[in-house]
Amino acid sequence: MIFCIPWLFKYFFRDNISAFAFWPFIVLKSPKLKSEQQILRHERIHLKQQVELLVIPFYAIYMIEFLVRLLIHKDVQKAYLAISFEIEAFRNDWDDGYLKRRKIWSMWRRGVG
């Protein structure tokens, strides 16, 4: 289910964030983004990751990995882009058929995608 909640992004997120997946929802910054298939695919990849890890462990692993990457890179954007969940999503968000052929735990399979 897709929701548009502009005020949430205005008050709680950085300007460059336009969507996020919070199982079972995709939340968008603007109604215009409902037609942006690449963004929706990216968030659907995250929903699949969340289900595979039984939702709550996904968020815990995501935050731990982000903090470790932040210590390594000392830059928020670099840390975010180095998270395994984001690597998989960015690597495959252009591909219409990716979720149909995606293997379990692909976020931890380097070179797969």
Image: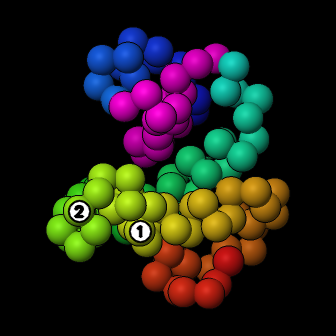
Check disc 2 and report the residue beneath it: 74
Is residue 73 visible in the rendered image? The answer is yes
The type of residue carrying mark 1 is Ala
- Identify which residue, 68 or 74, lies in the foreground: 74
Residue at (81% x, 57% y) in the render: 96
Magenta region includes residue 102: no
Residue at (47% x, 43% y) in the render: 21
Q: Residue 107's spot in the image, x, y percent?
A: 50, 75
Label 2 neighbour load within 10 Å: few <14, some 14-19, many 20+: few
Which quadrant does the N terminus fall into?
top right
Left or right placement of residue 26 versus residue 7 in this view: right
Is residue 58 visible in the rendered image? The answer is no
- Identify which residue, 41 or 69, lies in the foreground: 69
Q: Earlier in the sequence, mark 1 or mark 2?
A: 2
Check disc 1 and report the residue beneath it: 82
Q: Residue 80's spot in the image, x, y percent?
A: 38, 57
Residue at (56% x, 47% y) in the render: 43
Q: Is residue 109 above or below residue 26?
A: below
The type of residue carrying mark 2 is Lys
State the count of labels: 2
Q: Which residues are magenta?
A: 14-31
Q: Residue 7 sits in which quadrant?
A: top left
